[in-house]
Image (tube, helix red, strand yellow):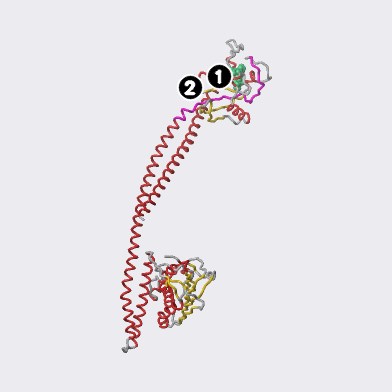
Amino acid sequence: MLKSIRENNLKIHVKITILLVILLVVSVAFNVIANTFAQRQQAEKEMLEKTQILDQEMRAVWDFIDINQSRIDTDANGNYNFKNIYCAIAGKSVAKLFMLQNDYEIRYVSFTPRYSSAYPDEFEAKALDEFAISEQNLEYYDITALNERDVFRYASPIRIKESCLSCHGEPAGEKDITGHSKEGLKVGDIAGAMSIVMPIDLYMEGIQSNIWLQSVYFAIVLGTLIIIAYLGISLLVKRLEHTNERLKTESQYKSDFLATMSHEFRTPLTAILAFAELWERSPTPKSERDIEAISEVRENGKLLLNMVNNILEVARTDSGKVEMNYEITDMVDLISTIEGALRPLAERRDIRFITTVDADVPLINADWEKLRRIVENLVSNAIKFTQRGGEVDVSVSLVSEDSTQDNTQDRTQSSARIKNGIAIAVRDTGIGIKAEELDHVFEKFVQLDKSSFRRYNGSGLGLTVVKELTEAHGGTITVASEPKRGSTFTIYIPADKDMQSKE
Ligand code: HEC
């Protein structure tokens, strides 16, 4: 028993540990992914800003030349003198100088390049396409791989202005002043694009070490929390186990105590009853009052004995000590024993007491004493809760297949179908049970209307005992009732002996 508890614990501990480790791993993984994503976005934003500045600077160079083109090409005397310095040359040269200092790459590309080196690659071609679609598209960027390196790529459009037409305008094919063929472009056309490449390895390295640092920190914090939670849970589990053990022994003590006590009570009670009977039968003359007093003693003693027996029975079932002594039982016999015991009580209360055992009721295999207690409890209850002038009726009949469950008003405690057996119905015309209370009648210590407790004294254990003993027989109990009209308790006991091989 203890061993199995310990094994169980081990399993729970292992399960909790695995669960917590999974939780930790998943959380850290989620943290790394979320962090990487956020950092990458941040990096992209920062690089975009950097590139935009660079783009503006390069544009300024280009524009400076464009604005001063005529001044460059005019000598001191005011004569036109082409010096071979124009925007593309300036842009490319400045870019080349700039690129000497760092890892960046700046170039100018076009679908109709004047040198094949200015032909766009895949990214640049996509950018050019975008720019051609709308004048609103002023930049195009992405993080991609270039020569097996992660890079940030950026492109912006270069459009033809009035001043560019002398070299790039119409008519197409005519040589310009530099000796290249004109492209035949118009103002607003895309002449090409500026393309900037920025390596991001350094950035990423920074981000990654940052993420690792954060993740380690996160894992440590979470791990600590989990360990604390785990220890807390273990402690709680241990305490619960302890309490559980204690409760078990306590309830065992209680059952044992109840069993012993009620057993002890029985001896003096039986003696009282025996002496009351002796006195009643003794030939000495007795007054009317004496006779009444004696029978009060006897009947109350019987009630008390019944209660004590019920407590004993419940204590026994609680500790799982119900032993069944099956024997061939004749219902006629059993009912007449009960009649003998309870008819005086019924008569004293002016209650008509009727018993019938159908002729076809067979001998059954049952625990005689327990079955007697079942019926006795039901009948004494019925008498207890019926007013003067009422009626209590006990009838035993044979039931065969399926005829058991057709009364919809019945509250069936167990829906097990009994194929063949006997039904013992105890009907009274007493105070009845309210519909909402029907479900609880078999619970321990339930005396339905608390106010009636004093009037109909009892321990509230009677019906619990009835139900437990019925179930020990493999049977079921149902109750149908109407307040103020009366109740009918029906017990079904299976006749098939093999079905009730409960201990
Ligand atoms: C004096 C003639 C001249 C003028 C004016 C001129 N360009 Fe160019 N442009 C050239 C030559 C020559 C090249 C090729 C030089 C090179 O790539 O080294 C070129 C190259 C380019 C390129 C690079 C792509 C390619 O086709 O090779 C772009 C883009 C460009 N020019 C746009 C313009 C724009 C926009 C203007 C007006 C602001 C302009 N150019 C003004 C002569 C000119």
Closest to the observer: 261 or 365?
Answer: 365
Q: Residue at x 40, y 47 (%)?
A: 14
Distance Cα–Cα, label 1 vs label 2: 16 Å
Residue 455, quarter of picture: bottom left
Q: Nearer the viewer, residue 134 or 445?
A: 445
Disc on res. 92: 1
Badge 2 crowding class, 10 Å Cα cut-off, few under 14, some 14 to 19, many 20 or more, is few
Q: Residue 375, how many percent across, how many down?
A: 43, 74
Q: Is residue 358 above or below residue 10?
A: below
Q: Which residue is mark 2?
A: 102
Location of residue 59 in the rendering, given as x and y in whole percent from the top left corner: 55, 23
What's the residue type where badge 1 is placed?
A: Lys
Q: Is mark 1 within 8 Å of ligand 1?
A: yes
Q: Where is residue 310 shown, x and y percent of the image?
A: 38, 71
Q: Secondary structure at mark 2?
A: loop
Q: Secondary structure at mark 1?
A: helix
Residue 423, numbered circle = none
**Range of magenta residues:** 179-205
Please state the total of marks drawn on the protein image: 2
Residue shown at 59%/28% (left/top)?
127
449 left or right, relative to 282: right
